[in-house]
Image (spheres, helix red, strand yellow):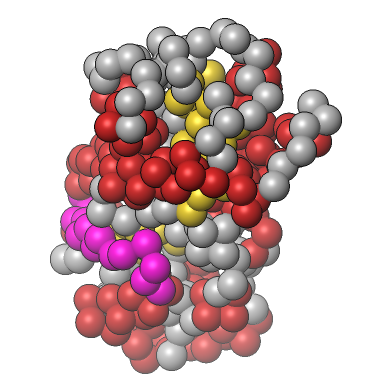
Amino acid sequence: MTIKEIARESGYGVGTVSRVLNHSKNVSEEARKAIMEVVERHHFQPNANAKHLKMQTQFGVAVIVKGTENMLLSAIVERMQTLIEKSGFASVIYYIDEDANEVKQAELIMRERKPYGFVFMGSNLRSYGEELKKIDLPCLVVTNSASFLNLDHISSIAVDDTAAAGCMIDYLYEMGHRKIGIIGGDPELSGPGSLRLAGCQTAFFRHQMDFEPAKMYAQAHYSLEGGYQATKLLLKQYPEMTAIFAMSDIMAIGAVHALYEEGRRVPQDISVAGYDGIELSKYVHPTLTTIRQNVEKMADQGTEILLRAIREGSGAVHEIIPFELQKGSSVRRI
């Protein structure tokens, strides 16, 4: 008898069965009773340290990544995959488009592959509350807080995107910039994007600067091409800007290329700042001023949270990782 078989016979998910077997309080009495009836009927003896769970795992953890050009997510995925597999679980990575529905993808994977848990990267789960209740497995959201969902099976690890974006606007203001264009994702689709935009707006207000989104904000995919095209648009609708804040380093690098193509020097004519602190930001010319997210801490602590939930049935944990303003040569004082 395995945990999956108990789940199938009781009608509850693997995550719920795991929580019952590990005496977690975060389970309804109805579910506990139904699962324990199956356990007692088959005289199932759970291994106290849950090694049986690792030994029987054929699939393990499904990692769903939104966007195919996000180098920050790629770095986190690589480290997490190594840690997951070192712990005895398998992992499979699914890359989906930025506009795709990650919860529908998770439901499909649940039906076809029967994983023990999910990792959502770059996701905006704000509008999926009811749908997420159907995914009765331990889940981890990376780079976006999920505390607002109030769901016991969904944990998260992220930086404070609102504070970090505000910090970058504060720095640009300190460097003399008052006309700042912003490149970011669709706030309706990108959770981090909406929080970063809110942080920018708050900082503009704090410094008594006007913010006109129709003129000063350009939406784009988190890609080189996205940053490139958004910069071309900003140059037309906001030609007086002295700085651009792009909500990812990849966007910022695309922006630099577009500016050079238009005969603008960085930072002499227009300063450019990014967000993420990917390794490439230190090797482009000029070196990028950016917000550095700690990839190692995010991957290490996130993996620990998820595996603990799978093995022990622990409830949701939401952690905020400190960010760092990384000063490069792409921003100048005016």
Q: Nearer the viewer, residue 95 or 99?
A: 99
Pinpoint residue 146: horizontal percent, then vertical percent: 59, 56
User: Which stretch is magenta?
Assistant: 87-101
273 above or below 5?
A: above
239 above or below 11?
A: above
Q: Residue at x 68, y 59 (%)?
A: 148
Q: Quadrant of residue 2?
A: bottom left
Q: Residue at x 37, y 62 (%)?
A: 98
Pinpoint residue 83: horizontal percent, then vertical percent: 26, 40
Residue 91 among magenta residues: yes
Determine the residue located farthest toward the left in the rendered image: 58
Q: From the viewer's perspective, tell me whether residue 105 is left or right of residue 130.
A: left
Pinpoint residue 286: horizontal percent, then vertical percent: 33, 15
Q: Quadrant of residue 258?
A: top left
**Quarter occupied by the C terminus:** top right
Q: Is residue 207 visible?
A: yes
Q: Residue at x 53, y 19 (%)?
A: 325
Q: Nearer the viewer, residue 150 or 331?
A: 331
293 above or below 5?
A: above
Tally the numbered discs: 0
